[in-house]
Amino acid sequence: MRLPLILKSWQSPLLAASCALVATAAPAFAADEPAAAPPPAEAAPAEAAPAEAAPTEGKPAEAKPAKTEAVPEVGGAVESAYGISDDAVPPGSRMDWAARREIRVIQKRAILKEGRHGLSISAGVVPNDDFFAYVAMGLGYQYYFSEDLALRIRANYTLPQQTSLQSSLQASRPDGPGLEVRLPQTLLGYALAGVDWNLLHGKLGFFTTKLIEFDLSLNFGVGAVMTKIVDQGKESSPTYAPDPAGNVGATMQIYLSDRFALGLDYTQLFYPKLRDLFGSTTHPGAGGVSHPLAATVSLTWFTSGLQ
């Protein structure tokens, strides 16, 4: 019984010494361990600007952009400091719809005519004659007093081409010979001087890539026509007589550039029928008014404008 008691008595001082040694070493081990991270600090507000570093010696400080204030919305879009940009326009806003529609308006005239001269060549037809198809070729001159008023002089030569109507009427028929056809008067040419009054000006757009200007004017003038008159029984000795004439019409000019324009002309002529020079003839068909019309296409070259 004495042996366990001795061991117990021997263990008690040893256990006490061990506890004392652990208690002494615990603060040292605690000091070697890393310290716990402090709790994160709250983020600084967005308004707070970072502190500027002091400029180094010998190096100028860089200019900082001025702080801009918020700009209110305009039509549903936020406007930046430099204006409304595409990135700042939200879909579905009023500014977004305006950008999609892209409404275009007619601009002012880009090609001016006031004080300019124009030289033109033309070609066309006189289609309202049953027995002749006239080919008309001519020259013209224009001077523009203003954008809406111009002096116009033109001269056209008409080349008569006989149609098949006369030959079909003169052909023999089953019930007898053909008809006798006589053409007492033939148009050879005309010269006119008048005024162009511009009423309409506009522009044509082609696939939103190019705008072409045009204008429409009315023509009024007087002049003379040259005709060939053949009296009955005197076919071998025709008479060439100038007759006074008047005209009305319309012209549309499409401006290809500042110097060139394409014109579409309609001219209605009026002159007396079968009239000799400065007097009437004894031809049975004398009297009345002839009214041929001419449809021509012209190309006009313009001089430089006013400086």
Image: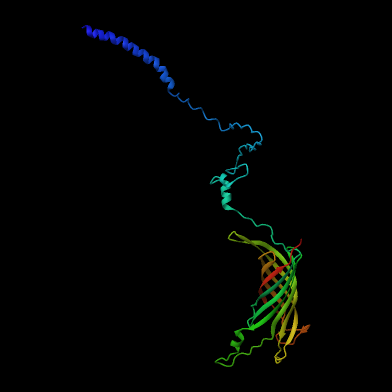
In the picture, measured across the screen, residue 231 lies left or right of residue 23, that is: right
Model colouring: rainbow
The N terminus is located in which quarter? top left
Residue at horizontal 78%, vertical 83%? 279
Marks counted in the figure total 0
In this view, the residue in front, 90 or 197, is: 90
Name which quarter of the figure residue 83 lies in: top right
Could you tell me residue 223's position as x and y percent?
75, 76
Could you tell me residue 235's position as x and y percent?
70, 90
Name which quarter of the figure residue 60 lies in: top right
Could you tell me residue 298's position as x and y percent?
67, 72
Please tell me whether residue 51 is drawn above or below residue 136 in the rendered image.
Answer: above
Could you tell me residue 290's position as x and y percent?
70, 79
Please tell me whether residue 85 is drawn above or below residue 145 in the rendered image.
Answer: above
Name which quarter of the figure residue 297 lies in: bottom right
In the picture, measured across the screen, residue 27 lies left or right of residue 151, that is: left
Residue at the far left in the pictured view: 1
The C terminus is located in which quarter? bottom right
Residue at horizontal 43%, vertical 22%? 32
